[in-house]
Amino acid sequence: MIKIVKEVLDAERRIRDYIRETPLDYSPFLSQKGNANVYLKLENFQLTGSFKIRGVFNKLLSLSGEEKKRGIVTASSGNHGAAFAYASNILNLNGIVFLPENASPAKIQDIKQYNVEFRFYGNDTVKTEIFARNFAEEQGMTYVPPYNDPKVIGGQGTIGTELEKQLEKIDAVLVPVGGGGLISGIAGYLKETIEDVEIIGVQPENSAVMYHSIKAGKILELESKPTLADGTAGGIEKDSVTFELCRKYVDDFILLSEEEIAKAILLMLEKHHILIEGAAALSVAAYLKEPTRFKGKNVVLILSGCRISLDRLRKILKAFG
């Protein structure tokens, strides 16, 4: 299995000049809700609007000169694609982004800001990833996975190194889960360096592939229903290293309904004046679902990204505002 602590510490040294150390803000409102000390890790303030830039930069900076020269390819539902496009520009690399046909319009617009080619394939992130990986092999290009890669996981785990510095005692961390790269990095690092920390994965009920796969003991092929948490939607590559890492390091999962996710988005707007996307709202919604579980504890909620379309926000406000 991957030596996560080493990967994370190597990533920390490699990418520090290219990313932001994001704030860890105390939430009086959420703390009072559960008689806990609740802190928000604001990855929605990260460069390109999500945590994904950490893994992308770590992977790209780890490539050999020959691998870079061949051109780079990735697949993404949006946030990874935007991070890939941004980092490609900074490092002067030629890249192609493949997106599923149902990718969020807001995230597509963000990718368009950068000088990178993008194409569409499939309606599920796993199908898009498989196609992009095969395309890269056929064209002799270098594939940059969105989550299924030790360097990508190591980059995402640098959130854990920041949390160690920012909070003296961490009892629980709630982390959005899609393919598992984010939680694998954070959990793999913190579980090896902090005693008794609890790591909880949070997923939408409409696309909880990792949860059901771990329950079944193998990676399942499950159809995902539409969800506000589109950043975590879709399946998992059949050989993904994140599956075993999640089995080893993640203590529990909490699943959320679409209504719970929507209300968490609105709560963050109302109480913190912060805009977050559906995937980022998962950690807030999970805490609100089981607040008494964390009584007296120092709890960190990972707010993974900020991209949400105005159209989707209007619909949420109309339904629940």
Image (cartoon, helix red, strand yellow):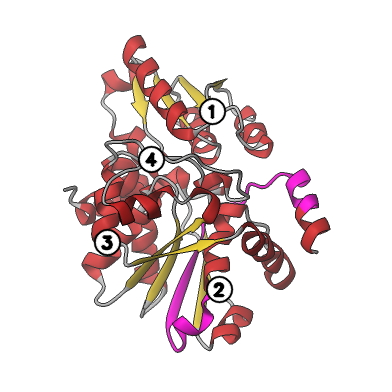
Q: Which mark is residue 99?
A: 1
Measured as percent of width and height from the top left, residue 311 is found at 78, 44
Helix, strand, or loop for circle 2? helix
Of the numbered discs 2 and 4, the one sitting upstream in the chain is 4
For the residues labelled 3 and 1, the Cα–Cα distance comes to: 30 Å
For the residues carrying marks 2 and 3, which lies nearer the camera in this image? 2
Graded by Cα atoms within 10 Å as few (under 14), some (14 to 19) or many (20 or more), the crowding at tag 4 reads many
Measured as percent of width and height from the top left, residue 30 is found at 59, 79
Helix, strand, or loop for circle 4? loop
For the residues labelled 2 and 3, the Cα–Cα distance comes to: 22 Å
Q: Does the magenta portion include 74? A: no
Given contact means CB atoms under 8 Å apart, are the residues at marks 2 and 4 in contact?
Answer: no
Image side of residue 275 versus residue 65, left or right: right
Residue 161 seen:
yes
Given contact means CB atoms under 8 Å apart, are the residues at marks 4 and 1 in contact?
Answer: no
Q: Which residues are magenta?
A: 288-315
Q: Does the magenta portion include 296? A: yes
Q: Is residue 245 above or below residue 196?
A: above
Q: Residue at x 45, y 89 (%)?
A: 296
Quadrant of image for the C terminus: bottom right
The amino acid marked with disc number 2 is Lys
Q: Which residue is mark 4?
A: 236
Q: Which residue is mark 3?
A: 249
